[in-house]
Structure formats: structure tokens, C-alpha cells
Amino acid sequence: MLSVTQERGGIIPKLKQDVMRKMIEQGVRIDNRGGLNDYRTLSIRVGVVKTADGSSLVSLGNTKVMAGVKVEIGKPFEDTPDEGALIVNLEIAPTASPDIEPGGPPDENAIEIARVVDRAIRHSGFLDFKSLSIVTGKHAWFLWVDIYVLNHDGNLVDASTIAAVTALMNTALPKVELDPTGNILRIDKGVRSPLALNIDKIPLTITHVKIGNLLLIDPTREEEDLSDGVYITGIAGGNVVAIQKVTGAFTRDEVNSIISNSVNQYVKLRNALMNAMANPQTDLKL
């Protein structure tokens, strides 16, 4: 009988662990994608949920994530009376992974992923929060971004960020008619305007895992379970806007290497995203 090691919910036979480590030392991934800096195939479909105000379905290899945006009018927060708000939630479907149990309290991993995605978008300058204001101190648009993990085969953060960002790019706000005192008379859902977005500052996350002394991007679920550490960098327009060390210890040189590589990978990932939005029926090799 093979011995098994369980880490962060994954179970990999010891023999397979040894094979994976040897392959990675030679610069080869278990899914034969090529090198340690290679992404899996990326697919993006927008407008997939007709009842949402914006939506996106993202596949990164076998990882599949859907995001839907729902807009509603609320009272702005007292400390930002001339801004709207963004709320990101994430749920991992029980069918997405054999170790996700149905029901019960929110999964801690899901909460952490939602926070990272929220932070990357919020601090990027991609979304103009002031453009969401309708009447200062009285009415503003609230954007609810709900992310659903349909299949978990690793790198949920990057896939979720892409899904949330492209769903926002697919979102349009209804026309609001006001009376002279600033009260809402009517919301015309037949007339819509796209969100005010700065495309030059699209936020994306780049996840690195450490296996031995090597760093890999876009890890599969097995590579995550095998890893000695996970480090996530949020990039927007070439600038670092968020950092999250999930597990493990990293040297200063490793962190510098991760950040430098993340900035380079951002350009490739952003270009692929823009190509996918322009050619929505095309799967992309990054």
C-alpha cells in the first residue's frame, strides 16, 4: 500500500510526490504544459448569466470559476459620501472538490480569496468609485460581485480575479431619473451605461508556489498540495497593489524574484485577457 501525505486538504501518494518533485527540478510540470513560468490554457466567456448586470465564466486549465455582478442603489458610507461601493463574495461549490462539504459556515479559504480579489481591485485605480455616486451622501451604486468556484484544480485566486474583473468589464448601470430634490423617480433598466473603468490599470493577481527551491506560477491543485509555500502578488498597470503570503517562508531574494516575475507575467496575462474580451470564442495559450 502506498503511503499518503495530506496537506491543506489534498492527498497525493508518496510515489507521485517524488515523481512530481523530480519533474519540477527538471523544469517540467505534471500536466506537461512546459516550463515553471507557463500558464495553462485560458478561456473567458462574458455575459453568460442573463439575470446578472454583468457576468463572466473563466477556465484556467481545469479550474473553472464564474462571476456575476448585481448592482443596486444604497446610501453611501459616511466616510465616502461621494463614492459607491464594491462587495466581493466567493463560494466554492461542494461539487468543485471532493473535500468541500455542503452547508455549514463560510469556508475560511473562500473568505481569504474574496478578500485578496477585493483588495486587488479596490487599490488598483481600475474602478472609479466616485463615478458610482448618484447624489452625494444620499444615493450611490453598490456593486455586488459574487464568485462561484465550479471546479477546483488549483490557482483559485488568479482565476477568481480574472472572473471578477471581466464581469465588471461586462457590467452596465441602468439610467436613474431624479426629481429636483435628488430623490429617485425611476430606474430605467432599458438604458444602460458601462462602468467607468481605467483599462490601463486592470488588476490581476499572480500566484507563485514554492516547491523545494523552485518557484512556479499558476499551480494545479496537486502542485499547491505539494508546495512549501504560496505567495500572491496583485498587479495593476505594472504596479504592485496587493501582496498576500498564504503559507510558507520566503527569503528576501525569493520575494524580489516573485515580484519581478509577477510584473513581467502581468503583461502577458493582461494581453491575453484583452484578446479574450475581443475574441470571446477563442481559448488562449499564454
Image (cartoon, grey):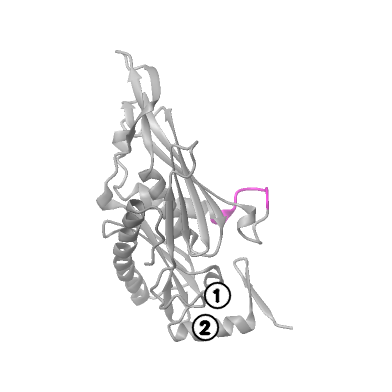
Across and down, in percent, residue 281 comes to 41, 54
Q: Find the magenta span and give its range.
A: 102-109
Earlier along the polypeptide chain: callout 2 or callout 1?
Answer: 2
Image quarter in which the N terminus is found: bottom right
Across and down, in percent, residue 261 comes to 32, 70
| Residue 40 falls in image quadrant | bottom left
Q: Is residue 260 visible?
A: yes
Q: Which residue is mark 1?
A: 226
Q: Amino acid at mark 1?
A: Leu
Q: Of the numbered discs in the image, which one, if any, rests on residue 44?
A: none
* 88 w.r.t. 108: above or below: above
Q: Is residue 78 visible?
A: no
Image quarter in which the C terminus is found: bottom left
The reply, left or right, for residue 116 in relation to residue 128 is right
| In front of the other: 273 or 217 | 273
Q: Residue at point 39% right, 18% down?
A: 186
Whether tag 2 and tag 1 are in contact, CB under 8 A, the answer is yes
The reply, left or right, for residue 101 in relation to residue 214 is right
Q: Secondary structure at mark 2?
A: helix
Q: Is residue 75 magenta?
A: no
Across and down, in percent, residue 264 comes to 29, 68
CA neighbours of label 2 inside 10 A, class few (<14), some (14 to 19), many (20+): many
The reply, left or right, for residue 60 in relation to residue 125 is right
The reply, left or right, for residue 88 in relation to residue 198 is right
Q: Main secondary structure of the magenta part?
A: loop
Q: Which residue is mark 2?
A: 21
